[in-house]
Amino acid sequence: MSAEESTAAAAAPAAAEEVDPAIVELTNQIGALATSITEAKKAKQPKDEWDPLLQQMLALKLQYKQQTGKDYHAPSKKQESKKPKGDNTQEASEKNKAKRAKKAEEKRLKEEKKRKQREERERREREKLEKLKTAANEDWSHVFGDAPMIQSATKTDVGRWTKIGKLNKDMEGKEVLVRGFLHTSRGVGKGAFVLLRSSLYTVQCVAFESKGDGKSGGIPSAMIKYMTGVPVESIVDVRGTLTVPENPVDGATQSDVEIQVTSYHCIHKATAAMPFQMEDACRPDLVKETDVGAYDHDANTDAEMGRVGQERRLDYRWIDLRTPANQSIFRVQSMICTLFREYLLSKDFIEIHTPKLLSGASEGGADVFTLDYFGKPACLSMSPQLHKQMAAACGGFERVFEIGPVFRAENSNTRRHLCEFTGLDLEMAISEHYDEVLDVLGELFVYIFDGLKERSGPELERVREQHGFEDLQYLKKTLKIDYATGCQMLREAGVDQGDLDDLSTENEKKLGDLVKAKYHTDFYIMDKYPLSVRPFYTMPDPKNPKLSNSYDVFIRGQEILSGAQRVHEPKLIEERAREWGIDVETIASYVDSFRNGALPHGGGGIGLERVVMLYLGLPNIRKSSMFPRDPRRICP
């Protein structure tokens, strides 16, 4: 408002008849404030300096309306009382009239447009409310929502569910029902895209809003919102029609199909916050870690570049196990046990189960977990060695094997040691030479390696996607070298290694590289170890008392089996035990078992987790143990 307009506004009420003085005063105040605001704007003052005046003027206008019942409008400029003179004055008046008429029309059209927009908004709001009211009256529970808790209240045909891994394009057009973990979900416009995961496999599920009601089908907008709102890792049932997309679905193992969702129900909702994202837990390794040396628990708690540290994974192992790589690792582990059992059963072995509570140390020494056994000292078994010998050589079973836990109280914080692991043990009677055992071992491992390639292809690929590894090289006829030959190969490569000295982990790895370069195999057997580095029940070499009839088996330069021909003569057992500092009284029942006749025999013990670790080229044995126990971890 200009100063002239405010002056005219102040004068206008005075010209009117019977004007209220209070209204005149109110009008004058509004005019004065308008003038001050106009001058402030012309002077380009900041808004925060004249905004208080504006607020005061607006308040006075509101007061004006309350007193007069009308909105305040600044009066028009007072027409000059003099009569217009000449044609120029008349022409100017006509132009002004046209301009005013044009502005009035523009204002009318603008107001009309605003009115129509307002009416359209109101119409849409009414329709939305009507839809919500209609939806509220419809029952969509059979289409989407939280399912009742499964308490074995009813039974139907479990064959209704299809395994995600079985979905393929040959099933196009079929209705399927699948269950799995909600891996990811995202909303796009009026649609929802969900990735469902079960064990190693994932499938994409798609839904778009469509018309319908609770009885005749359709996908309501509330269902789209529900699908994108269910927490990840919840358990979900999805029903829909299997279709073949134009392009393969990225990120899904069942990439040639997807499910067009018709119903979506949450079976169990994840309520706790995720300690890490599954996408991060599934990321491929950035670099290949070393598989030997010390393991630093603290340094492996967290990881960078969107990865998850090993210790954090183990703290929440129940979640970490869901990754396709971990699902595969332990399926490979299971298959190794299956193949181990299959082969030995085919060779007339029987499976036995020996006690894990002992009155003394399994193999002597102090590396045992001790406990109180009803007032008597006892320990956890660090090997089924003594009992499998009793069964095979003394009990007459001749060929036995066992799959069971082994306990070692070694404070070894390395990448390949555990305090509890699973032992694959075997023991067998021999006719005349321990090579009979080595022949069985060589054939056994070839059977396992061949079986993994034939039966675990998808699992091996899932592991390879996250933890890249090279296929194991092995010979159909297993390579065997003696200890002296291995030491000689090391010396020729510039490594200081004596024929009677124990092999360090580093030298074992180096020897593995040398063997592979020369014989093109990652798997071999080495025998004739020094007697001083083997257990008390190991048979001495008949030609060299410093050596023994013992052997180790290696994969990728690391030992996965230790074995020997056993001593079956009681006097020699007692002699060897005393040399080891073992109180013969603590193994009296073991020694006595050989006094009534015993078959010559030999065998070996395999560390299952280490076989899995080395076969898959994993850098840490904790990755191949489902719930590892090391000197610093005893849970979960």
Image: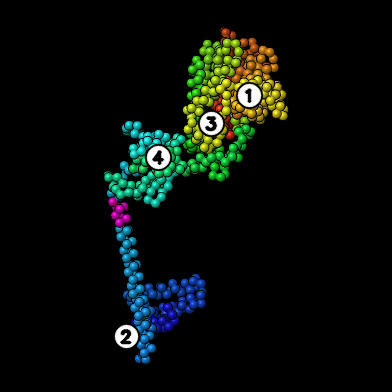
Q: Give the foreground label among 4 and 1.
A: 4
Label drawn at residue 625: 3
Secondary structure of the residue carrying numbered label 4? loop
Q: Position of residue 526 (x, y in %)?
A: 63, 21
Point out the tag, 1 or 3, that comes first from the N-terminus.
1
Residue drawn at (43%, 42%), measured in percent from left and top?
248
Q: Position of residue 428 (x, y in %)?
A: 55, 15
Point out the tag, 2 or 3, that comes first from the N-terminus.
2
The residue under label 4 is which amino acid type? Answer: Val
The residue under label 2 is which amino acid type? Answer: Glu
Q: CA distance from mark 1 to mark 3?
A: 25 Å
Q: Is label 4 in contact with label 2 (beta carbons under 8 Å)?
A: no
Numbered circles on residues, count:
4
The residue under label 1 is which amino acid type? Answer: Ala
Question: For residue 99, what is the image quadrant?
Answer: bottom left
Q: Quadrant of the N terminus?
A: bottom left
User: Which residue has dot 2 on it?
Assistant: 17
Secondary structure of the residue carrying numbered label 1? loop
Q: Is label 4 in contact with label 1 (beta carbons under 8 Å)?
A: no
Residue drawn at (29%, 48%), measured in percent from left and top?
212
Residue drawn at (60%, 33%), measured in percent from left and top?
291
- Indicate left or right for 299 with 253 as reference: right
User: Which residue has dot 1 on it?
Assistant: 366
User: Which residue has dot 4 on it?
Assistant: 257
State which region is magenta: 127-134
- Indicate left or right for 205 with 411 as reference: left
Q: Is residue 360 magenta?
A: no
Q: Is label 1 in contact with label 3 (beta carbons under 8 Å)?
A: no
Q: Give the foreground label among 4 and 3.
A: 4
The residue under label 3 is which amino acid type? Answer: Ser
**Above or below, comparing residue 298 to residue 225 in the picture:** above
